[in-house]
Structure formats: C-alpha cells, structure tokens
Image (cartoon, helix red, strand yellow):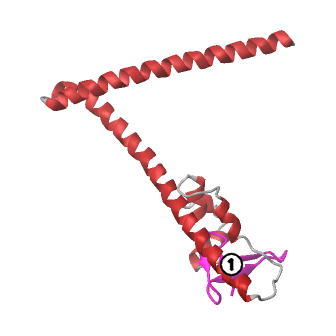
Amino acid sequence: MRIEKCWFCSSSVYPGHGIAFVRNDCKTFRFCRSKCHKHFKMKHNPRRMRWTKAWRRAHGKEMVLDTTFNFEKKRMAPVRYNRNLMVKTVQAMQIVDRIRQVRKTRFEKQRLAAQLKKRHTSAKKESVKGVKLLEGPNKAKALQYEKDLEAEAKTKAKRKVRVERSAAASSGAMETEE
C-alpha cells in the first residue's frame, strides 16, 4: 500500500481516494480532493494559496531543510522480505518520527519567539510615544525603554558606519588592483 502525496497541497492521498490526472506526456498528477484538482486546472500556483504546504514552506512557517525528510523519499527497488530487516525498519521509523517531532517543536518555538520579540519591541516603541500620558511606575518603565531604544539605535548606527567603511575599503582595494 503506497500513500501518495497530493500534487497541489502535499497532503496524503490514500489508495482508492482522490483524483488521478494523466497528461498527454504520461505524467501523472494525484489530487486529494476536487478543490486541488480545480485549482490545478485553473493553473493556480500552490505557493500563492495560503492553505497549501508549498505556501507554508515558502513563507518560513514549516521546516524546509531537515535530514529526516530523506527517509520519506520513494524507493523503487523491491527488497525481499526479511523479518529482522522489517523489525529494524519499523524501529528506525519510530526513532526518526520522534526526532522529527522534537525538531519540529524546536523550530516552531524559535519562530514564535521571533514573532513575540517583534511584538514586544513594537509595544515598547508605542509606550515610548505615549510617555507623557503615563503616570507612576509605568512612566518609569517607558522612560527606561526610551533609553534602551536610543542605545540600540546608536549601536546600529555604529555598525552601519563600520560596514560602509569596510565596503569602501574593499572597493578601493579592487580599484587599485585593476
């Protein structure tokens, strides 16, 4: 029993389910449901549909590069049945699945942490704008945020100047070599 992948949305297509479309050049496309088939016929790009795996991978919502994905590839060479080999294969599949789950949760935590950091910085900037309206300990916090943002802006400016100087120096060196 082979579980195929939908060509459009990359979900699983079980035997006896979905639609198979064969083009004139004998290329076979499998679809999980009519929705995917209709979008394919209308020549829609799966990377532009927010509900597809292609969109999620293109926009950094899911892992793209991971060594555990190599185990999902099709293998066309048939292997003679061997009980010990099958037991080891099933055990290896379980281990790979556990590793994939751990990596996936780590990836999601890192992605969400970056979003949270962006939200916090935007909230800090907003509180700095309204410092005059605040009173009590909140005003002290907002003033501290203001100092932190100024210090951060200075360090960014210094880094930018260093990068510009190094770029100018490297381009000057290239001109003298010619």
- Residue 17 is covered by the magenta coloring: yes
Observer able to see residue 175: yes
Majority SS type along the magenta span: loop
Q: How many marks?
A: 1
Percent across and percent down for residue 11 are 59, 73
Observer able to see residue 51: no
**Element assignment for label 1:** helix
**Relative horizontal placement of residue 97, taking residue 89 as reference (left or right):** left
For the view shown, which residue lies furthest in the right direction? 178
Dividing the image into 4 quarters, which one contains the N terminus? bottom right
Give the magenta range: 1-30
Nearest the eye: 101 or 24: 101
Q: Is residue 46 above or below residue 120?
A: below
Amino acid at circle 1: Thr
- Residue 78 is covered by the magenta coloring: no
Nearest the eye: 91 or 40: 91
Nearest the eye: 56 or 79: 79
Q: Which residue shows up at 75% across the image and 74% down it?
A: 74
Dividing the image into 4 quarters, which one contains the C terminus? top right
Percent across and percent down for residue 4 are 67, 78
Q: Which residue shows up at 61% across the image and 20% down it?
A: 163
Q: Which image quarter: residue 93?
A: bottom right
For the view shown, which residue lies furthest in the front direction? 84
